[in-house]
Image: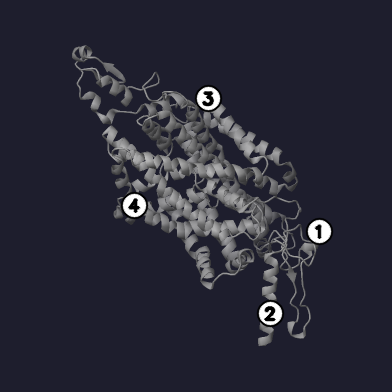
Amino acid sequence: MSIFFTLQAAQEQLVHDVSSSAVLTGAAADDDLVGEIQEPEDGVDRGNWSGRFDFLMCLLGFSVGLGNVWRFPYLAYSNGGGAFLFPFILMFIVVGFPLMFLELSFGQFAALGPAAIFDRICPLLNGLGYGMVSVSAMVSFYYTVIIAWAFLYLFKSLTSELPWERCRSWATDNCYSHLEASECSQVNGSVYLNHTCFNATMVEKLEISSNASSNASTRAPPAQDYFEQDMLKISGGIDDLGGIRWEIVLCLLLTWTLTFMSLSRGTQSMGKVVYFTALFPYLVLSILFIRGITLEGCEKGIIYYLTPDFAKLKTAQTWVAAAVQIFFALSPAWGGLITLSSYNKFHNNCFKDALIVGVGNILTSFFAGLVIFAIVGYLAKELDMKVEEVVEQGPGLAFIVFPDVVTRLPLPPLWSCLFFFMLISLGMGSEFALLETVITAVQDTYPPFRQKKVFVVLTVCCCGFIGGLLVCTEGGMYILQLMDTYSASWAVFIMAILECTIIAWIYGANKFISNIEMMIGRRHIYWHRFFTAFWKFLTPSMLSFLLVFNWVDYKRMEYAKKVYPIWAELIGWFMAFIPIILITCMAIWKFYRAPLERTFRAKVQKLLHPTPHWGPAHKIPKYDLGDIESGKGKTVTNPGFAAAGANPFETRI
């Protein structure tokens, strides 16, 4: 018996050695051959990343986005400052990294996007993939509008003086320009009030107090009025959409044009563009950090950012905020991770990729917080305000606080151009992955469209442009906030739980880990136990808690102190339900199409298990150990070598 096990171990090692260097080839000839890796049924080549770093850069661009710059710093200061890093890192370990690695290995193994991959591993829940695609599609509609805003600001910055340095015709009574105030103060006895400089005679005649202009509570920076009153011309509410802002529409058209040019040639063109979109933001952040720490008052902001408030860790809201930020940062259950990894070569080390990008995302978020709070500390000193009164979340931070800050730096147009070019790079990197998810879904659902990549990309971009026009209206900000709140909300948690259930429970965690080892090699037993525990128990449990807490903590939406009407809330909830509706309807349809002669239980069991087409995407050697003790059936064959037109006895990478 010892000889038997020795021979069997040697045989398995031979198979592994040969498979690790096998040629990646076309479709399998026999679906029933165990151990043979198959192409998708249509046999059409989906393409691959031209290099591993192309994939890494695209994954980094997808994961590191606008949320790292304007969302993480706000969450950090409002949830315990430096203490927020503890739940954030813990949520990365419990939720973010396990899900990220699961999706990267899942997509790489089958070389399919979310729209097709779930139909093979669990036909009953194949709607899960389309639910993920719907989230990416909804987010891409308004995400491109934010990029269009950044383009418009970039173009407006190409002047000798930024248009929001002074209070102009669009300003409200509370507009306060530090530039105009400084110029006014140089005239003896003059007072700057309501964006007007009153000379000494007018001050005495109108009995204006010199303290009136120093009341910081009534001030509004010109950048705020410029953003709301001039660029957006924001309406009174979501029920008043107003007219189209044509400047934004033209910038939106530019955004979609650049997106089309970057995606039309598939992974080959996108893989090169992302080198710039992924790396350039780090250059700008580094420049801003160096400039920020040289500003007076910067230490005030950095100390506020890093000072831990451990009392916040006792509240459930802090932990929920950390987990939600992980979902925004790494984007699991959005379909993008599965899509990008589906273009990997079969033996790519996706575990190392997940580790590099995941840790890089955490460090980027922390570094972006340092950059922002160094500058915000300076701004707080300039305005004589508390740090917490300066910082805003989301668009307020990117399009009000920073534009105001750059007006106080030497060469304001230069800093403004750098900052908004960085926002464009961050946004485009994420947008490419979101759109590639939708495009891959179309091509995997209708394989003949793989030969018409340009047509598919053009159609998707045109639909996205038309859909984004609604957000370019005067009431578009209210629509953007509604979509941002509901399109990628609690439905993403449900899809992540279902994903863990399908792979770890129905398909089997051990079986899936064996599939991963087929790609990246054998791993230690503790590595097995770690991911088994997280995929089966810890990650779904944490997601369930977050889901319930989100429902319990539900509050009506509001923006600019305006509460959304009931009909708008219902539209928001409908958007949140779209993925769930898709999953439910497609499950019912699959069950209805199942053979009539089967019982209810037999149908469910059949539809919960993988189809014969499930398997790895590329061929590796098939083998039959047979009866090793009798010396029969020991040969190892790889028909894929011959099918590839190569020497069947030659292995090459």
The residue carrying mark 4 is 82
How far, Cα to Cα, is label 2 from label 1?
Answer: 30 Å
Q: Which mark is residue 645?
A: 1
The residue carrying mark 2 is 8
In the rendered image, the quadrant that contains the C terminus is bottom right
The residue carrying mark 3 is 247
Marks 4 and 2, the one that precedes in the sequence: 2
In the image, residue 561 lies at what x, y percent?
37, 34
Marks 2 and 1, the one that precedes in the sequence: 2
Check the image and tell me how it is coloured: one colour
Marks 1 and 3, the one that precedes in the sequence: 3
Element class at badge 4 = helix
Marks 4 and 1, the one that precedes in the sequence: 4
Element class at badge 3 = helix
How far, Cα to Cα, is label 4 from label 1?
Answer: 59 Å
In the image, residue 198 lies at what x, y percent?
25, 16
How far, Cα to Cα, is label 4 from label 2?
Answer: 54 Å
Element class at badge 1 = loop
What residue type is disc 2 on? Gln
Whether residue 435 is visible to the viewer of this picture, yes or no, is no
When the figure is inspected, residue 420 is found, relative to residue 612, above or below; the finding is: above
How far, Cα to Cα, is label 3 from label 4?
Answer: 41 Å
How far, Cα to Cα, is label 3 from label 2?
Answer: 70 Å
Looking at the image, residue 301 sits to the left or right of residue 627; the answer is left
Residue lying at the far bottom of the rendered structure: 1
